Image (spheres, rainbow, N blue to C red):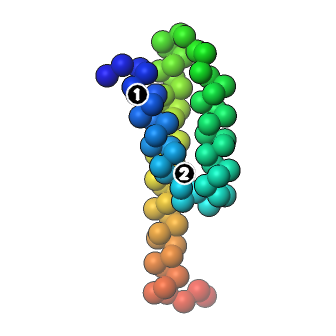
């Protein structure tokens, strides 16, 4: 898979996952777009690889954030706060 297609894949995943971002979907979308635009002219393959890894890390962090939010919602439904 080429780096270009990997970058596009990471961007699409971030845009999709940002729909439920706690700070607001629009805020997440604009910040994500700004980050990708800032690095659009990067040509060094190693630097591009690092940026792809950073994007994948953000995706993993969003998954953890959403899982934690679901866990807290379920806990709130079934257990009383003491």
Lateral position of residue 52 relative to residue 42, left or right: left
- Depth check, front residue: 17 or 80: 17
Vertical placement of residue 30 versus 75, above or below: above
Residue topped by disc 1:
6
Where is residue 76 drawn, in percent x and y? 52, 82
Q: Where residue 46 sits in the image (x, y, percent)?
A: 49, 14
Q: Secondary structure at mark 2?
A: helix
Quarter that holds the N terminus: top left
In percent of width and height, residue 23 lies at 66, 58
Q: Quadrant of residue 3?
A: top left
Label 2 crowding class (10 Å Cα cut-off): few <14, some 14-19, many 20+?
many
The quadrant in which the C terminus is found is bottom right
* Residue 12 visible in the current orientation: yes
Q: Which residue is mark 2?
A: 18
How far across and how far down the image is residue 54, in percent? 53, 32
Question: How many discs appear?
Answer: 2
- Lateral position of residue 8 relative to residue 2, left or right: right
- Tell me which residue sits at (51%, 23%) in the image: 50
- Name the element at disc 1: helix
Q: Looking at the image, which residue is at 61% across and 46% down? A: 29
Disc number at residue 19? Answer: none
Give the vertical position of 76 relative to 7 (above or below): below
Q: Are marks 1 and 2 in contact (CB under 8 Å)?
A: no
Label 1 and label 2: CA atoms lie apart by 18 Å
Residue ID at (54%, 16%): 47
């Amino acid at each position: 898979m080429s780096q270009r297609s990997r970058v596009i894949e990471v961007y699409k995943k971030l845009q999709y996952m940002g729909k439920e971002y706690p700070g607001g979907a629009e805020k997440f979308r604009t910040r994500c777009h700004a980050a990708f635009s800032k690095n659009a002219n990067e040509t060094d393959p190693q630097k591009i690889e690092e940026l792809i890894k950073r994007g994948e890390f953000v995706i993993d962090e969003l998954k953890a954030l959403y899982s934690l939010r679901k866990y807290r919602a379920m806990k709130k439904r079934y257990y009383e706060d003491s």
